Image (tube, helix red, strand yellow):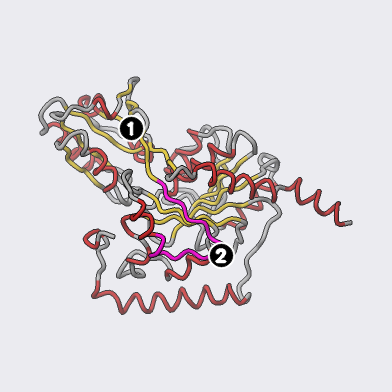
């Protein structure tokens, strides 16, 4: 893939060797059974990656929620990164971003019929979801970003990786962005290459397949992002991306791991884009507010600000934004689309696993064997 975007820090490679030795030892202990993984009698699907951020875990988890909620009582269990609480927290309508983190808060708002809980101890979180009176009717649990949390044995492991930064092109932390060696791909049941360009050729698909060399028991899918109508963050109103004029000035305001794909997608509508990027999960400060206000004020009209759904969770209650900024700010919803006309195959894989491993199916199977 594009080597310029991988950003390998060669001078840190010796530290990566030390880091890799520790991770490899830990994985070996799990593989040998010295460290144990807990299996549960409820369908558990993990959506994770081998890298640090930026593969689209939240949109893909939301894709699964759309798929499963009509048929099952679904729960999402997340770590709740950068929340200001500890332990197990079950999200309610009154929960704040500070209580549960930005991504869980976003999912709770979009899917009020799903249980959303946070706990860095995934075993404890699963036990609470399965046995607490408020959530004991749960039928499926989605683990958000728990690929390296091997104390839990998911029934289905979905591994995501960015098309622009395949794990085969990367190195371990801190020289690269890999959390564990690329051999960790072997634990995946499904591999999804995310953020793919819309105009991929059969040769492009073939190159990725040959590069990743999925094992016979693994299924490889490709996904891309599609965008819904932009919604005003403050007040009511919406716009389509196609309504953006070539002369229009756009501030792309993000605090996500990899905003490059969104920037590329917007460039087909206007070349007058000013990226305003902050670190992933960033909590905006008064200094940041001033910078946002100044950036928009310096741009010629017509102008607007586009931000992500995840960032909107931290922007909606932010104080000090100018009236012009509040009027110009739109939220761009992101959805996942499975490519190569394979969405029905992907969906059947997910539904088939859940149906086969549901509590009712396990009970019925046990009765048949008596």
> What's drawn in magenta, residue-wise?
209-223
Give the left or right position of residue 62, taking residue 154 as reference: left
Circle 1 sits on which residue? 331
Give the left or right position of residue 353, taking residue 330 as reference: right
Q: Position of residue 212 (x, y in %)?
A: 41, 64
At mark 1, the secondary structure is strand
Question: Total of numbered circles in the picture?
Answer: 2
Q: Residue furthest top?
A: 236
Whether residue 117 is situated above or below residue 305 in the rendered picture: below
**Residue displayed at 65% across by 38% down:** 72
* Quarter of the C terminus within the rendering: bottom right
**Residue displayed at 57% across by 62% down:** 217
State the mark number for residue 196.
none
**Residue displayed at 67% across by 39% down:** 134
Give the left or right position of residue 190, taking residue 194 as reference: right
Q: Quadrant of residue 355?
A: top right
Q: Nearer the viewer, residue 333 or 215?
A: 215
Q: Position of residue 109 (x, y in %)?
A: 48, 33
Crowdedness near tag 2: few (<14), some (14–19) or many (≥20) residues, C-alpha within 10 Å: some
**Residue displayed at 56% across by 48% down:** 142
At mark 2, the secondary structure is loop
Q: Is residue 146 magenta?
A: no
| Lower sequence index among marks 1 and 2 | 2
Give the left or right position of residue 65, taking residue 176 as reference: right
State the mark number for residue 150.
2
Q: Nearer the viewer, residue 118 or 76?
A: 76
Whether residue 108 is situated above or below residue 181 in the rendered picture: above
Q: Position of residue 94 (x, y in %)?
A: 51, 33
Q: Nearer the viewer, residue 199 or 127?
A: 199
């Amino acid at each position: 893939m594009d080597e310029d975007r991988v950003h390998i820090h060669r001078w840190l490679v010796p530290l990566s060797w030390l880091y890799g030795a520790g991770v490899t030892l830990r994985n070996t202990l799990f593989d040998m059974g010295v460290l144990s993984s807990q299996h549960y009698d409820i369908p558990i699907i993990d959506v994770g990656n081998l890298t640090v951020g930026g593969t689209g875990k939240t949109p893909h988890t939301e894709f699964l929620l759309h798929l499963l909620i009509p048929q099952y009582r679904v729960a999402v269990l997340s770590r709740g990164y950068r929340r200001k609480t500890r332990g197990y927290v079950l999200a309610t309508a009154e929960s704040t971003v500070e209580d549960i983190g930005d991504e869980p808060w976003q999912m709770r708002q979009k899917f009020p019929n799903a249980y959303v809980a946070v706990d860095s101890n995934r075993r404890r979180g699963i036990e609470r979801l399965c046995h607490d009176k408020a959530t004991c009717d749960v039928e499926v649990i989605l683990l958000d970003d728990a690929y390296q949390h091997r104390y839990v044995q998911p029934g289905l492991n979905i591994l995501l990786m960015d098309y622009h930064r395949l794990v085969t092109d990367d190195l371990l932390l801190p020289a690269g962005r890999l959390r564990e060696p690329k051999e960790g791909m072997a634990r995946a049941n499904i591999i999804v290459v995310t953020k793919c360009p819309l105009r991929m050729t059969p040769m492009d698909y073939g190159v990725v397949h040959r590069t990743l060399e999925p094992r016979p028991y693994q299924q490889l899918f490709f996904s891309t992002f599609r965008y819904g109508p932009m919604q005003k963050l403050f007040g009511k109103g919406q716009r389509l991306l196609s309504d953006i004029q070539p002369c229009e000035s756009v501030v792309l305001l993000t605090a996500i791991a990899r905003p490059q794909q969104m920037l590329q997608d917007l460039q087909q509508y206007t070349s007058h884009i000013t990226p305003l990027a902050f670190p992933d999960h960033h909590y905006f400060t008064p200094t940041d507010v001033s910078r946002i206000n100044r950036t928009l004020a310096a741009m010629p009209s017509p102008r607007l600000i586009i931000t992500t759904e995840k960032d909107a969770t931290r922007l909606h209650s932010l104080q000090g934004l100018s009236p012009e900024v509040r009027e110009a700010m739109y939220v761009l919803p992101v959805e996942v689309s499975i490519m190569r006309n394979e969405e029905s195959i992907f969906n059947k894989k997910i539904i088939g696993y859940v149906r086969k491993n549901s509590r009712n199916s396990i009970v019925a199977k046990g009765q048949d064997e008596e």
